[in-house]
Amino acid sequence: MEAFDELLELQALDTEITQLEHKAAHLPEAAAVVEAKRVMANLRAESETIGTEHRHLLAVIEANETAVTGMRKQLDRLAAQMKTVIAPREAEALQHEMANHESKISSLEDESLAALERSEELDATLAELGPEIAARGSNVEEAERKLREALGSVREALSGATERRGATAARIDAQWLAQYDRRRTAHGGVAIARLVRATCGGCHIDLSTSEVEAVRREAATRRECPNCGRWLVI
Ligand SMILES: [Zn+2]
């Protein structure tokens, strides 16, 4: 029966279109872009975290310098005061205050030194991250270029298949088309299949000899798989 041969051709095109749409939605090139962007985002985040710590360390060093300068002035004042002091108890108190200042200055300077060393380490890490981020950036661009290419070729295949589908559908009676659409919806996208030896091409279940004979006895447009109910072409 001609109508069923045309429907079988239409089915092949619809299956091809479904597969191409699935392919377009699940391109490995798209996953590669996501992965390249993820790596890039991690590096940027790392670089940002380091930058924040680096700025904080510089601020600590600057604040310590200001504090030390102020304390040294106070020390000078206390030293000048010391020269004029006669009472031993007063001298002792001044000495104690001066020792306190010196100890604070020393601990601030230690802190600044540690901050400086750490900031130099961070500088070195940032210097390594810079070129790596640039390299990863070109990885993202390359992955995006490959994705555009892959998508382009799938879309080209899709438009070709869609065009052929239109031409095939135009040759089929509207009444058959409507039935075909209903059956496709009911049967997971496959309305019609070939019976290959005793196997239904739709559900892939083998028919018994008597079932095959019963199908053969039907008129060509009334043949259905006894298991899945799809149209069968023999
Ligand atoms: Zn079947």
Image: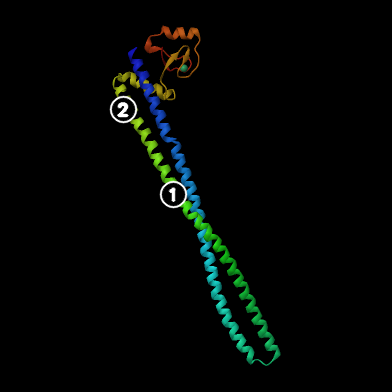
Q: Tell me the SS state at disc 2.
A: helix
Figure quadrant of the C terminus: top left
* Coloration mode: rainbow
Q: Which residue is mark 2?
A: 163
Q: Using the image, tell me which numbered label, if any, was put on residue 67.
A: none
Relative height, residue 145 to residue 197 (above, below): below
Residue 31: x %, y % from top left:
46, 40
Q: Which residue is mark 1?
A: 137
**Residue at the image point whose x is 43% and y is 46% from the top:** 140
> Label 1: few (<14), some or many (≥20) within 10 Å?
some
For residue 147, which quarter of the picture?
top left
Residue 30: x %, y % from top left:
44, 39
**Residue at the image point whose x is 47% and y is 49% from the top:** 40
Residue farthest toward the right in the current orientation of the protein: 88
For residue 189, which quarter of the picture?
top left
On the picture, is 55 further left or further right than 99? left
Q: Amino acid at mark 1?
A: Gly
**Residue at the image point whose x is 57% and y is 76% from the top:** 68
User: Looking at mark 1, is its residue's CB closer than 8 Å to ligand 1?
Assistant: no
Q: Amino acid at mark 2?
A: Glu
Residue 34: x %, y % from top left:
46, 43
Q: In 3D space, how far apart are the residues under numbered discs 1 and 2 (Cα atoms)?
A: 39 Å
Figure quadrant of the N terminus: top left
